[in-house]
Amino acid sequence: MTKQRKAILEILRSTDSHPTADWIYEQVRKIIPNISLGTIYRNLSILKDMGEIMELSFGSTYSRYDGNPKNHYHFCCFECNRVYDIDIPVLQTINEEVSNKTGNIVHHHRLEFYGICKNCQEKN
């Protein structure tokens, strides 16, 4: 694995947020000052294709990246725009139910919850 990919992966796995490529770029530049934003995007794409990270899109114009490639759920806060992992088991019965009702083969599903996080509730 290249130095750039290792740095990106290390940064993603050391944060509990789900950062944008721009944020990752700023963090990697502290380690590799001459890296370009284009290199960040290329390596994020490669890491995603390798199954090392997940690219998340929550209806915004910017993708977010997750250092945990295993299927898990997320909570998206309307107030602070933070994305949190939800620590509950993935419900495999949903896959089976959709397969049974539609005849489709379901490989996996993704589920996001939207609302106002506990921190933002406490501020208001």
Image: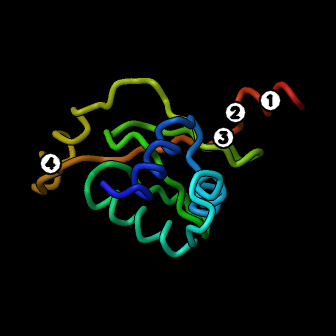
Residue 42 located left or right of residue 79: left
Q: Residue at x 50, y 39 (%)?
A: 74
- Horizontal side of 75 relative to 5 (left or right) equals right
Sequence-first disc among 1 and 4:
4
49 relative position to 38: left or right: left
Q: Do the residues labelled 1 and 2 touch (CB within 8 Å)?
A: yes
Q: Which mark is residue 99?
A: 4
Q: Name the residue under label 2.
A: 117
Disc 2 from disc 4: Cα separation: 33 Å
Q: Mark 1 points at which residue?
A: 121
- In what element is the residue under mark 2? loop
Cβ atoms at labels 1 and 3 below 8 Å apart? no
Callouts 2 and 3 close, C-beta under 8 Å: yes
* Marking on residue 56: none
Residue at point 67%, 42% (across, down): 77
Mark 1 or mark 3: name the one nearer the start of the chain. Answer: 3
Mark 3 lies on residue: 115
